[in-house]
Each structure stands twice: as structure tokens, then as C-alpha cells.
Image (spheres, rainbow, N blue to C red):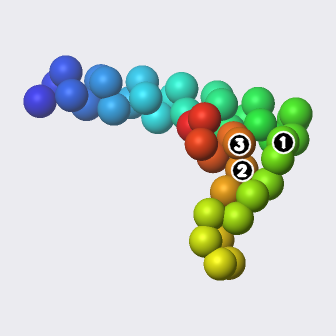
Amino acid sequence: MRKELDVAKEAARAAGEVLLEGLVRGGEVRYKGEVDLVTETDEEA
């Protein structure tokens, strides 16, 4: 169980770094549904 927790923490940290970088650089915003938006950064994270 400990190994899975460590992997989950690392994945969350990596996704957080991607999201922070996305705030700085901006990016394309698209619709994934009728009213749901998704950004490039969302997909990368």
C-alpha cells in the first residue's frame, strides 16, 4: 500500500507542476461538451 501512495503523491506533484506552468504560459481553451471547457494544460496534467 505504501508504494501506491508514493506513486500517487508523485503523480499529483507532477500534475501540479504542469498546472502551475500552464498558468504562466496560457494556452488554448476548447469546449469538451456543450458548456464544459478544457484547456491544453488540463489535458497535460
Give the quarter of the image for residue 43.
top right
The image position of residue 15, as x and y in percent, is 55, 33
Which residue does the numbered mark 2 point to in the structure image?
Answer: 39
Dot 1, how many residues are within 10 Å of its Cα: few (below 14), some (14-19), or many (20+)?
Answer: few
Dot 2, how many residues are within 10 Å of its Cα: few (below 14), some (14-19), or many (20+)?
Answer: some
Q: Amino acid at mark 2?
A: Thr
Q: Is residue 21 visible?
A: yes
Q: Amino acid at mark 1?
A: Gly
Q: Earlier in the sequence, mark 1 or mark 3?
A: 1
From what the image shows, is residue 43 above or below residue 17? Answer: below
- Per the model, the C-alpha gap separating discs 1 and 3 is 6 Å
Which residue does the numbered mark 3 point to in the structure image?
Answer: 40
- Per the model, the C-alpha gap separating discs 2 and 1 is 7 Å
Are the residues at dot 1 and dot 3 in contact (C-beta closer than 8 Å)?
yes
Are the residues at dot 2 and dot 1 in contact (C-beta closer than 8 Å)?
yes
Are the residues at dot 3 and dot 2 in contact (C-beta closer than 8 Å)?
yes
- Give the side of residue 27 with respect to residue 3, left or right: right
Q: Is residue 16 visible?
A: no
- Per the model, the C-alpha gap separating discs 3 and 2 is 4 Å
The image position of residue 8, as x and y in percent, is 33, 32
Residue depicted at 46% across the width and 34% down the height: 12
Label of residue 27 in the image = 1
Q: Which quadrant is home to the C terminus?
A: top right
Q: Circle 2 — which element?
A: strand
Label of residue 6 in the image = none
Q: Earlier in the sequence, mark 2 or mark 1?
A: 1
Q: Amino acid at mark 3?
A: Glu
Give the quarter of the image for residue 35.
bottom right
From what the image shows, is residue 37 above or below residue 22? Answer: below
From what the image shows, is residue 38 above or below residue 21? Answer: below
The image position of residue 5, as x and y in percent, is 25, 31
